[in-house]
């Protein structure tokens, strides 16, 4: 049966939560494979908004297995808060619905503190992180100094490992940042107590997911952030600390690449980004402000206003290549109603050169000017439309231009925030 990866095709915030919720209807399991609680996936059902940071978006479907893979970094206090909040609403009644990898690395208090102190010290040169300790946790993972859920199985071994790590960390905090040292016993006791409450969910999720695949189940792999925030393929260093591209689903969930049949990229009908870094189509004018207002462009995790601009097809073409996209979901088309003429970038000008690919050098990218094409907009509201043929002609023309440039079909249109305000053109689980 089909196994599908869903990734963000821009700088995150593309509406992945809603799209995952739509396709979860056809899935037996949803697997989150990277990132941490720096992600915020928003789902609106019958007027009620659910914002998820760690638990996969499929949790609103009672019969769907939800998995937090080994590639995710987990703040156990946040995970517990999220579980309790969902249960308080009468959802997630079966604890067996959620599984968390025993190999997932834990965000520790010193990770969060270091993240915040670094951003403060960098001043205007800051990356724009959420300050939730994601980057420092991934650093420790790569330096082989991380602490995983499986380490908490043995309290004695956990304390010894934490003591070794914390002694070096405390020396650094005191000398470099002049802060108070962290207390070993306090952290140890706190994390062991949280583990007692979470251990019923902790298991070998690679084995679990591969078993489901062998049984012919439909698996949906859910990414966080977006392609241009990938640590290898994004606008480095203004990126997140994990591989957000589709290939990350294999390493982050413990499956082989032969397990994947389709890769769907999510893109807004315009472009946004949060945090620092170059953004060629950014609109720092009334049009950009209108996009922000009409689109509700404020971070689900931080509340920060998002930077807004016209659709950048150069960024999307890059996403098609590095993800191997087989389809595009186009979200927030409804936001563009009434904008008059709509622009979209098909290349960049750098001095007297025309650039058609996303340059890795940020000095070059930061000095690129977008080469726009323009299409006449539409005034009609798109809310409530259920068939492509009923969309205004200019909307259909806009979609066709995107498909022609990217050489990838649009498989879903989102015309509003609510579940059901969408048109599925091609379902990767049923085609």
Image (cartoon, rainbow, N blue to C red):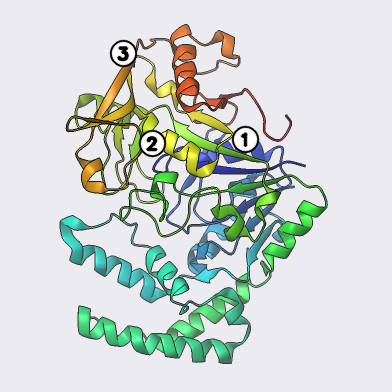
- The quadrant of the image that shows the N terminus is top right
State yes or no: discs 2 and 1 in contact (Cβ < 8 Å).
Answer: no
Q: Nearer the viewer, residue 80 or 87?
A: 80
- For label 3, the SS is loop
- For label 2, the SS is helix
The residue tagged 1 is 22
Image point (62%, 87%), residue name: 154
Image point (21%, 78%), residue name: 177
Return the x and y of residue 331 as percentages of the image width and height.
48, 29
Return the x and y of residue 357 as percentages of the image width and height.
36, 36
The residue tagged 3 is 341
Please give the count of numbered marks on the rendered protein. Answer: 3
Return the x and y of residue 98 as percentages of the image width and height.
67, 58
Mark toward the viewer: 3 or 2 = 2
Regarding residue 339, the answer to whether it shows in the image is no
**On screen, residue 230 above or below 112:** above
State yes or no: discs 3 and 2 in contact (Cβ < 8 Å).
Answer: no
Assess disc 2: are there few (<14), some (14-19) or many (≥20) residues with their C-alpha within 10 Å of its C-alpha.
Answer: many
Q: Distance between the residues labelled 3 and 2?
A: 21 Å
Regarding residue 21, the answer to whether it shows in the image is yes
Give whichever of discs 3 and 2 has the lower sequence position: 2
Assess disc 1: are there few (<14), some (14-19) or many (≥20) residues with their C-alpha within 10 Å of its C-alpha.
Answer: some
What is the number of the mark on residue 12? none
Mark toward the viewer: 2 or 1 = 2
- The quadrant of the image that shows the C terminus is top right
**On screen, residue 141 above or below 56:** below
Give whichever of discs 2 and 1 has the lower sequence position: 1
Q: How far apart are marks 3 and 1 (CA)?
A: 31 Å
Return the x and y of residue 86 as percentages of the image width and height.
58, 53
């Amino acid at each position: 049966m089909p196994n599908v990866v869903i990734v963000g095709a821009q700088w995150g915030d593309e509406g992945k939560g809603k799209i995952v919720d739509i396709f979860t209807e056809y899935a037996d399991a949803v697997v989150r494979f990277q990132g941490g609680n720096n992600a915020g996936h928003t789902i609106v059902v019958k007027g009620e908004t659910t914002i998820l940071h760690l638990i996969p978006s499929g949790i609103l479907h009672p019969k769907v297995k939800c998995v937090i893979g080994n590639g995710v970094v987990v703040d156990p206090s946040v995970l517990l808060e999220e579980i309790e909040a969902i249960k308080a609403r009468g959802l997630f009644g079966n604890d067996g619905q959620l599984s968390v990898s025993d190999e997932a690395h834990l965000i520790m208090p010193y990770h969060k503190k270091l993240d915040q102190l670094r951003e403060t010290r960098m001043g205007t040169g800051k990356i724009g992180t959420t300050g939730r300790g994601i980057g420092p946790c991934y650093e420790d993972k790569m330096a082989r100094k991380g602490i995983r859920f499986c380490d908490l199985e043995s309290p004695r071994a956990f304390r010894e490992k934490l003591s070794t790590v914390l002694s070096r960390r405390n020396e650094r905090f005191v000398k470099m940042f002049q802060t108070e040292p962290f207390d070993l016993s306090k952290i140890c006791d706190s994390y062991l107590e949280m583990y007692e409450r979470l251990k019923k969910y902790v298991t070998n999720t690679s084995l679990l997911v591969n078993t489901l695949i062998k049984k012919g189940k439909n698996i949906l792999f859910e990414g966080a952030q977006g392609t241009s925030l990938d640590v290898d393929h994004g606008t480095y260093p203004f990126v997140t600390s994990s591989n957000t591209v589709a290939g990350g689903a294999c390493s982050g969930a413990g499956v082989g690449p032969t397990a994947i049949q389709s890769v769907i990229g999510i893109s807004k009908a315009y472009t946004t980004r949060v945090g620092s870094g170059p953004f060629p189509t950014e609109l720092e004018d009334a049009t950009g402000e209108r996009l922000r207002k009409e689109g509700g462009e404020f971070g689900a995790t931080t509340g920060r206003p998002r930077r807004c601009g016209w659709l950048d097809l150069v960024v999307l073409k890059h996403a098609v290549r590095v993800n191997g996209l087989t389809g595009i979901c186009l979200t927030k088309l409804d936001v563009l109603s009434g904008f008059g003429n709509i622009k979209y970038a098909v290349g960049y000008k750098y001095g007297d050169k025309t650039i058609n690919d996303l340059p890795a050098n940020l000095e070059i990218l930061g000095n690129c000017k977008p080469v726009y094409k323009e299409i006449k907009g539409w005034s009609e509201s798109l809310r409530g439309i259920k068939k492509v043929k009923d969309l205004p002609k200019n909307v259909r023309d806009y979609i066709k231009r995107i498909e022609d440039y990217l050489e990838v079909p649009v498989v879903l249109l989102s015309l509003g925030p609510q579940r059901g305000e969408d048109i599925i053109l091609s379902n990767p689980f049923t085609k």
